[in-house]
Amino acid sequence: MSGLQAEEAPRPGSGAMFDRIAPRYDLLNRVLSFGVDQSWRRKTVQALEVIEGDRVLDLATGTADLAISIAKSTPALEVVGLDPSAGMLDCGQEKVQRAGLSSRVRLARGEAEHIPFEDASFRAASIAFGIRNVADRSRGLSELHRVLAPGGRLAVLELSEPRSGVLGPLARFHIRTLVPWLGAMLSGQREYRYLQTSIAAFPPPDDFAEMMRTAGFEVTKVERLTFGVAVLYVGVRR
């Protein structure tokens, strides 16, 4: 986590950092994205093309926003949400219960590099705003490929730093300056300082798409959203 002193900073992919911000995580997402993150998630759900009877993995599920949206999109669908943060999962479990989805959405603790499920056990998988925090992204993508059945779809939604375009400078100002400042102010935590540097360090869209191909996916879509502030990657497991 680049914005903190080394002795205070758990690595971004660990659960400890997110445990501290879990209670305000959803509010922060709405404020920092001006509510646009909800439309990004809807696009992600649509990209999965799930049908009744599918079993779906939502990796880095956090407070289960995307897992709940997937379950609501299609009846008779099972969703498993996996996350390393116990605090996030506690918040997510409360939301699942309020939504009346406890029988179809199951949350568990685990990390992307070691997904605790059998080979080819899911028909679709998603990860929203989480692959950036995976220390070994290649291993995480390989694990996703392993647990997906042949022909299964993967949707990855991740923040990005626009590098061109008329509104690129404004978008970069938002990510580099406003997001860390607002995040720290609203959450009372300094963890959001790492956000800008982690976004800037994430591979450009073409490079990440190539990582997906190397892991065994046929990349069918790389869609830049909201002037490139977020990118939706869609792949099919070969």
Image (spheres, rainbow, N blue to C red):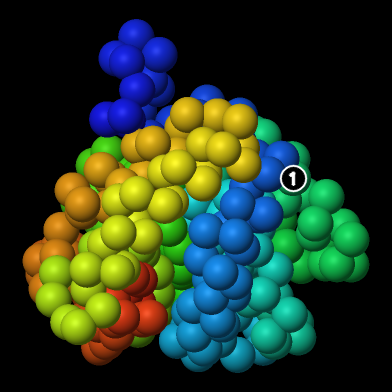
Decide if residue 75 is on the left or right side of residue 147: right
Local secondary structure at mark 1 = helix
Q: Where is residue 201 in the image (x, y as percent from the top left)?
A: 18, 48
User: What's the residue at 21%, 52% (across, down)?
Assistant: 200
Q: Where is residue 133 in the image (x, y as percent from the top left)?
A: 35, 44
Q: Residue furthest top?
A: 7
Q: Where is residue 154 in the image (x, y as percent from the top left)?
A: 38, 74
Q: Against 157, is 234 above or below?
A: below
> Which quadrant of the view contains residue 22?
top right
User: What's the residue at 15%, 58% (across, down)?
Assistant: 203
Whether residue 112 is visible, yes or no, is no
> Which quadrant of the view contains residue 6?
top left
Could you classify mark 1 by the number of other residues whose Cα lies within 10 Å: few (under 14), some (14-19), or many (20 or more)? some
User: What's the residue at 49%, 85% (across, down)?
Assistant: 43
Whether residue 155 is visible, yes or no, is yes
Front-lying residue, 223 or 83: 223
Quadrant containing the C terminus is bottom left
Mark 1 highlights which residue? 91
Decide if residue 163 is on the left or right side of residue 35: left
What amino acid is found at the position of numbered circle 1 in the picture? Cys
User: What's the residue at 40%, 14% (across, down)?
Assistant: 8
Front-lying residue, 79 or 34: 34
Front-lying residue, 201 or 92: 201
Q: Against 205, is 1 above or below?
A: above
Q: Position of residue 56 (x, y in %)?
A: 56, 70
Quadrant containing the N terminus is top left
